[in-house]
Image (cartoon, grey):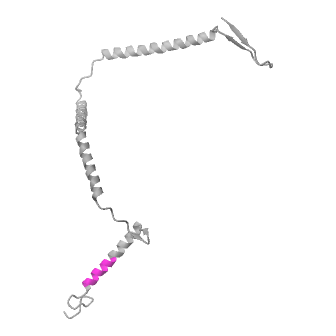
Amino acid sequence: MSTEILKGSGRPGDPSLRITDVPDARRLAFEEQRRAEQEAETKAMVDQITHDRFIREHTPPRPLVPTDPVEQLRAQWKSDQWLAEIEESRRLPERLAELEAWARKAQLEAMLSPPPPPPPTRFGKALSSAALAHEAALEAEFAARNRAAVKAVCTDCRVVGGDCGAH
């Protein structure tokens, strides 16, 4: 047991520091309290475990097949669902092989097909969708006028209007 006193810096009001290897009563009380809390927690956990074990050992097991008809239907549905998942997981390798073959075929077809035509351009710039729609409308109007003109010409004498009056 030793006690050592370290003096302060020498200025008035600086405290000295006392170092001792003897534990004081406050530290011992704190450690005792902490130890008691840990033992109480451990005892509570042990009590909970023994209580759960007692309940588990003295509770009758649930029946494998429910007695309630609604619960029976639900259990049957869950069983069917589980069996369907198992069947699907068994077919998974075949399905994956089929999908891989389809992907290889699609890649081969994409490599062998000609490239898509370039988008139409005017003065070196690609046309917008509105410009494409406008050109399509103009072409449709031109084609309709030509069809009407062809119908209007008399096929025998080539008179425009379709009725030359002679026939």
Q: Is residue 157 above or below residue 48?
A: below
- Residue drawn at the location 34% of the way across and 65% of the way down: 117
Which residue is rendered at x = 42% and y = 67% of the image?
Answer: 128
Q: Position of residue 57 (x, y in %)?
A: 31, 15
User: Which quadrant, please, contains the N terminus?
Assistant: top right
State which quadrant residue 52 falls in: top left
Given residues 61 and 9, the one toward you in this image is 9
Rendered residue at 27%/20% (across/down): 61
| Up-down relation of residue 13 to residue 4 (above or below) | below
Task: Find the residue positioned furthest to the right.
Answer: 12
Left or right: where 131 falls relative to 149 = right
Q: Position of residue 70 (x, y in %)?
A: 24, 32
Q: Which one is nearer the viewer's eye here, 50 or 117? A: 117
Where does the image place residue 111, in percent across and percent down from the top left?
A: 30, 56
Indicate yes or no whether the magenta region holds residue 32: no
Indicate yes or no whether the magenta region holds residue 149: yes
How many numbered marks does the figure carry? 0
Residue 75 occupies quadrant: top left
Quadrant position of the C terminus in the picture: bottom left
Horizontally, residue 16 falls left or right of residue 26, namely: right
Give the dominant element type of the magenta stretch: helix, strand or loop: helix
Q: Which contiguous range is marked in magenta?
A: 141-151
